[in-house]
Image: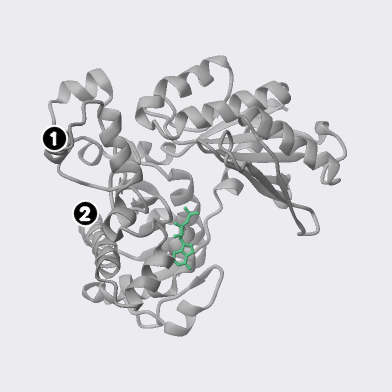
Amino acid sequence: MEKTIAINAGSSTLKFKLFEMPEEKVISSGTVDRIGIPGSNFTIKTTDGKKVEIDQPIKNHEEAVNLLLKELLKLDIIKDYSEITGVGHRVVAGGEIFQDSALIDDKVLKQIEDLKEYAPLHNPANATGIRAFKKVLPDITSVAVFDTSFHETLPEKNYLYSIPYEYYEKYGARKYGAHGTSHQYVAGRAAKMMGKPLEELKIITLHLGAGSSITAIKDGKSFDTSMGFTPLAGITMATRSGDIDASLVVYLMQKLNITNPEDILTILNKKSGLLGLSGMSPDLRDIIDAAEKGEHRAQMAIDIFVNNIVKYIGSYATEMGGLDGIVFTAGIGENSVPMREKITSKLGIFNVKLDQALNEKRGERFISAEDSAVQVMVIPTDEELAIARDVEKFKKMGD
Ligand code: AMP
């Protein structure tokens, strides 16, 4: 049986899902955590759903890949490495170069590395994951799937910033968006659920997780999206600020005596958002608990998060000239009953009506009431499956 592995490499993590293809059956998944940091560990799910945890030092991504492959054999998930015939890597920034997924060769790998300024937290880690796999399994079909590709269809009016045009021409200073694989996947599912071609629908997809982004999908294409030049822009996130006035960056650098621009970016990427506002946690579950106990800053963080989201929904519905469906996905979107309730309760102007009982269920489903003017859905995202499907396309081309 042919297998394809989908890889999502972060700066200190490497997540994977192994699929039997073309059946799309998940046969294993897992995460290597704290790569290069004391306390490294590896969790892997076996074919019968058992979780195996291994605590051992894992110095770098190459060691992580080696450990992962070794355990696949040891746990009898695969009999031989030759069963894995394809690997798909999530890459956050593809700039204007990658309108679609790409077969990875040396040139593509260099281009991914050269795009590091577009996603400083992500692209270097994605490239490290690619190199590590190339070293261990050099001959399999290796594909890069870009978070930005789905947003290549943004119209000029939605991707250009109001800065001198030559900066776009010379330096690629524009909006690229992110989470494209997720937005595209859930929008496709939504159209199936709604029983209409995606091209005939106006949909807003809310990818609400540690990183959050919102996309307006019109004529089957990404029409506007909340992340910007990098994934720092848009709505308040777990630790990212989302949109702020650019002058504030300079002002704070002066006030905090920051001379290295990387330092202010670290504050905006890692110490802001829900964490910065609440002062307690980046995790919305902790913040909701604290708010219930009367913690003002926790309540304020929630209110700002919700308000950011509904502002985007309002403007995207206006831009598209209508709204047929709203999709909740990712960690918060899929799991938080109270957040979905709070967000939809602010959408009365669109005659959105929530069905409380459906909201409390789990899995892919409608959560809007029969008489809601806009259909609201929860659709668990599956970026790994979308990645594995793209790898299959390239495998077929090579046949
Ligand atoms: P993701 O980035 O999609 O993996 O989502 C991870 C985020 O989802 C974490 O930051 C959690 O705070 C959040 N999350 C997961 N489950 C819940 C829940 N039941 N309520 C609120 N937030 C949640």
Amino acid on which disc 2 is placed? Glu
Dot label at residue 162: 1
Amino acid on which disc 1 is placed? Ser
Q: Residues within 10 Å of mark 1 (few under 14, many from 20)?
A: few
Mark 1 or mark 2, earlier in chain: 1
Q: Where does the image place residue 209, in percent across and percent down from the top left?
A: 43, 56
Do we see residue 325 in this rendering? yes
In this rendering, position of residue 250 left or right of residue 18: left
Q: Where does the image place residue 274, in percent across and percent down from the top left?
A: 32, 57
In this rendering, position of residue 333 left or right of residue 344: right
**Residue in view at x 51 percent, y 59 percent:** 189
Q: Are marks 1 and 2 in contact (CB under 8 Å)?
A: no
Count the marks: 2
Of the two numbered discs 1 and 2 in the rendering, the one whose residue sits closer to the viewer: 1
Q: Where does the image place residue 343, in percent across and percent down from the top left?
A: 31, 70
Q: Hey, which quadrant is residue 175 in on the image?
A: top left
Q: Foreground residue, 31 or 162?
A: 31
Q: Is mark 1 within 8 Å of ligand 1?
A: no
In this rendering, position of residue 256 left or right of residue 94: left
Pick the quarter of the image with the C terminus.
top right
The vertical placement of 189 against 55, above or below, is below
Q: Foreground residue, 355 or 90?
A: 90
Q: Secondary structure at mark 1?
A: loop
Dot label at residue 135: none
In this rendering, position of residue 87 left or right of residue 73: left
Q: Kindly identify which residue carries mark 2.
A: 319
**Residue in view at x 51 percent, y 31 percent:** 125
Q: Where does the image place residue 372, in percent across and percent down from the top left?
A: 34, 78
